[in-house]
Image: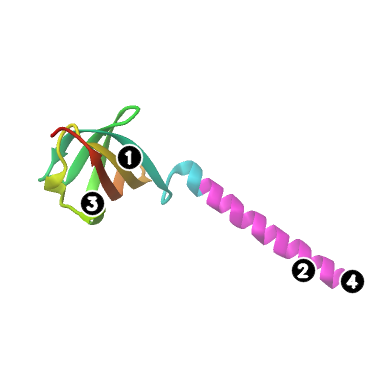
């Protein structure tokens, strides 16, 4: 009976430890995918960055792995225009926000 209780306590402890590690990572914002929606203020093709005004101005780095979509169709960084409304899925590491997916929703015609 003691062995069974020991195994239950050990497994429970490991599960709690795992949840604690996940929560610490989420609190630091590292590796946790987040989303912001806002209006494009600047597109820098050379620096591969998009500046979006959400609650405040945020800069997102675009990589070769970033998916850019409009109406479900693939687009390029150059297709993103100032004043377009976008939704950005990104990962934050320190002060760097790396875009995983940018959806161009609407904008200036």
Q: Does the magenta stretch include residue 96?
A: no
- The residue mark sitting in front, 2 or 3, is 3
Disc 2: which residue = 7
Q: Is residue 30 left or right of residue 63?
A: right
Residue 14 location (% of width, % of height): 66, 61
| Precedes in sequence: disc 3 or disc 1 | 3
| Precedes in sequence: disc 2 or disc 1 | 2
State the residue in front, 109 or 45. Answer: 109
Magenta extent = 1-24
Disc 1: which residue = 95
Residue 20 location (% of width, % of height): 60, 50
Disc 3: which residue = 68
| Precedes in sequence: disc 2 or disc 4 | 4
Q: Is the magenta stretch mostly helix, strand or loop?
A: helix
Disc 3 to disc 1, C-alpha distance: 22 Å
Disc 4: which residue = 1
Residue 101 location (% of width, % of height): 29, 51
| Precedes in sequence: disc 2 or disc 3 | 2
Residue sitting at x 13%, y 40%: 44
Residue sitting at x 24%, y 51%: 69
- The residue mark sitting in front, 3 or 1, is 3
Q: How crowded is mark 3: few (under 14 residues within 10 Å), some or many (20 or more)?
A: many
**Is the C-beta separation of discs 2 and 3 under 8 Å?**
no
Q: In the picture, which quadrant includes the N terminus?
A: bottom right
């Amino acid at each position: 009976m003691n062995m069974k209780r020991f195994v239950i306590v050990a497994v429970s402890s490991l599960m709690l430890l795992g949840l604690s590690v996940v929560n610490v990572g989420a609190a630091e914002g590292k590796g946790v995918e987040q989303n912001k929606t806002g209006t494009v203020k600047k597109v820098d093709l050379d620096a591969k960055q998009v500046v979006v005004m959400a609650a405040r101005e945020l800069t997102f780095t675009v990589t070769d792995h970033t998916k850019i979509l409009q109406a479900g169709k693939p687009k390029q960084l150059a297709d993103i225009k100032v004043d377009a409304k976008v939704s950005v899925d990104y990962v934050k590491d320190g002060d760097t926000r790396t875009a995983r997916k940018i959806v161009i929703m609407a904008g200036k015609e």
